[in-house]
Image (spheres, rainbow, N blue to C red):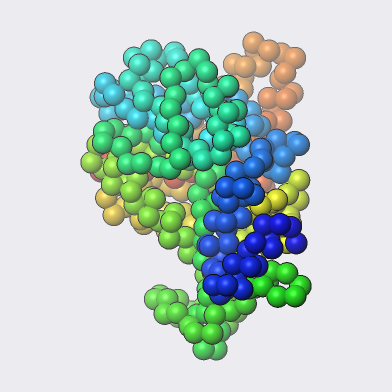
Amino acid sequence: MNSLGHRIAKLIETQGPLSIAQFMTIALHDPAAGYYATKDPLGVRGDFVTAPEISQMFGELIGAWCAEVWQQQERPKTIRLVELGPGRGTLMADALRVIRAVPQFLEALDIVLVEASPHLRAMQHERLKDFSVRWSDRYEPADGPLLLIANEFFDALPIRQFVRTERGWCERMVVAGNDGLGFALSPSPTLIPGTGQAPIGGVIEVAPAAAALAQDIGRTIARWGGGALIIDYGYEEPGFGETLQAVGRHRFKDVLANPGAVDVSAHVDFAALAAAASANAKTFGPIGQSIFLERLGIGERRKMLAEKNPDHAFELDMAVERLTDFTGMGTLFKALAIMPPNTPKPPGF
């Protein structure tokens, strides 16, 4: 067990077991040793690769999506463009390269990157130095039209797990012992409505922070206009299984063994996000990433880039295949749009 693991064990000894949500928050965001506070997780030398790092086409299509939504809504003179969890700034840089072709839209933008990691902020600043960009530690509701992008952000928000037992739904907690950190069930059950068909041993994951954020985004967009695009890996209909996972060096790892050294995440419950946002706004999707990108014209974009750079045609083909493969990212990853009420269907949906 590493140093952060020992600190978490001490905290448990002092205050009692932690929920998985509390453990995830510490493991990912501890200022001194948290995963996102201390390292660059992306790329071949990191722990995982995201769609913007696979190909510039991904970010370019999202930039075109934003421009079209802006045009659909009568081109407001000012609109905030927010990206949650912008990584190295690759997606935003690629999106802005397309947006530059629509000068009036670029001039209207107030660009905000929500990023708490100083290390990643420095990389974003370098990549986006030609644009007027500001940073925030957390999402703050806009007081005007909002365009929001969240690619592989919601999967990292903390979850709680509940296990169906003979005595009811008991929360899975993180405990400490002689062998390090482990899981145990709370002695007292929790009432969870609408789960009567779950088998003994079935697991439900809930993400209160994700639902609250989706509701806030929906409330802002319903009032002021704009749109949000959420792309992540997850499921459309909730079931009774667990998806909590840890990844390091492109391999699955033990969730509890080395907190802060590995990425910890869970599959996104898109039905729950849509339900939360629909309290105020209108939602479209979720649909598979393959369908979404194909409708946005990734095939045409690949052809255009290949004609300009024939030596890279094979690389472009491989990137499109990886992003749209029905046995991989094309199906596992899904897109959800949050739009104002009475809005036309957004691009790609």
Q: Is residue 174 above or below residue 233?
A: below
Of 186 and 200, nearer the camera is: 186
For the C terminus, the quadrant is top left
* Vertical position of residue 214 compared to residue 309: above or below: below
- Residue 26 in percent (x, y) is at 57, 56
Residue located farthest toward the top when viewing the structure as drawn? 308
Residue that protrudes farthest toward the bottom in the picture = 166
The residue positioned 47% from the left and 18% from the top of the image is 131
Q: Is residue 160 left or right of residue 181?
A: left
Against 185, residue 330 (above or below) is above
Residue 186 is situated, as x and y percent measured from the top left of the image, at 54, 80
323 to the left or right of 162: right
Place of residue 282 in the rendered image (x, y in percent of width and height, measured from the top left): 31, 46
Residue 153 appears in the rendering: yes
Would you say 324 lies left or right of 178 here?
A: left
> Quadrant of the image for the N terminus?
bottom right
Residue 237 visible to an observer of this rendering:
no
Residue at left offset 62%, top offset 77%? 184
Q: Which residue sits at x=66%, y=46%?
A: 328
Q: Nearer the viewer, residue 23 or 146?
A: 23
> Number of marks in the image?
0
The quarter holding residue 6 reads bottom right
- x, y percent for residue 105: 36, 19
Q: Residue at x 44, y 54 (%)?
A: 210
Answer with the quarter of the image where residue 217 lies. Answer: top left
